[in-house]
Image (tube, grey):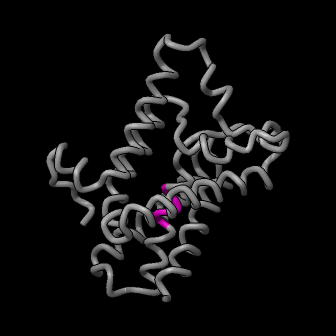
Amino acid sequence: MFVRTESFKEFIRYYPVISTIIAIHIVLYLLTALPIFPPGWLMERFAGVNLYIVNGEYWRLLTPIFMHSGFAHVLFNSFSLILFGPVLERMLGKGKFVFLYLTAGIAANLATLLIEPLTYIHVGASGAIFGLFGFFASIIAFRKDLLSNENKQLIITITVIAVIMTFMQSNINITGHLFGLLAGFLIGAATLKK
């Protein structure tokens, strides 16, 4: 279920939303890394900066989901999306998957705005990806029949490790991770119970 056996072309065809998100990650990373724009130009305009959000730059609740602070950051988040996203894109369909992903990411960024200081700056897809973990947790809680016991154990283990690592690493948006997880769980609870 979480092992990818598709070819590159098959992956793009089967999972167009995830492929598009990863393409956006890569393009934005390259635009920040290559000398196309002045240094820091894209980050200055699209990073989540709480002070700018409260002053009306509301797009910064969305754009940080696609921006990353370096190669390792974009690689880790894109790899996580490749591993855990396809099951949900297939299960939910394209539209509902986009809703889950973006809503969890925006909820993570909104919580960051409300809880962290105005000087707080953040980027990364982690809040949205934690939203996927939260949705899986809601499947385990409310629709056990949708996952095998092995996959349930795997998801629980990875989610627990991800939450623990959130508190052990520096430069992590703890608020974003936790509220992304909560948002994904609540979206799952609202949709899976019906």
Above or below for 108 versus 144: above
What number of labels is visible?
A: 0
On the question of residue 170 being in view, the answer is no
The N terminus, quarter of image:
bottom left
Name which residue lies at 80% across and 55% down: 114
Quarter-of-image position of residue 27: top left
x then y, percent, for residue 194: 49, 89
Above or below for 37 versus 29: above
Name which residue lies at 67% across and 47% down: 61
Asked whether 17 falls inside the magenta stretch, the response is no
x then y, percent, for residue 54: 83, 44
Region in magenta: 129-133
x then y, percent, for residue 175: 68, 55
Name which residue lies at 67% across and 51% down: 109
Residue farthest along the front direction in this orientation = 95
In the drawing, does residue 49 fall left or right of residue 41? right
x then y, percent, for residue 80: 39, 51
5 vs 150, nearest the viewer: 5
On the question of residue 190 being in view, the answer is yes
The chief SS type of the magenta part is helix
In the drawing, does residue 168 fall left or right of residue 60? left
Name which residue lies at 37% across and 58% down: 85
Quarter-of-image position of residue 75: top left
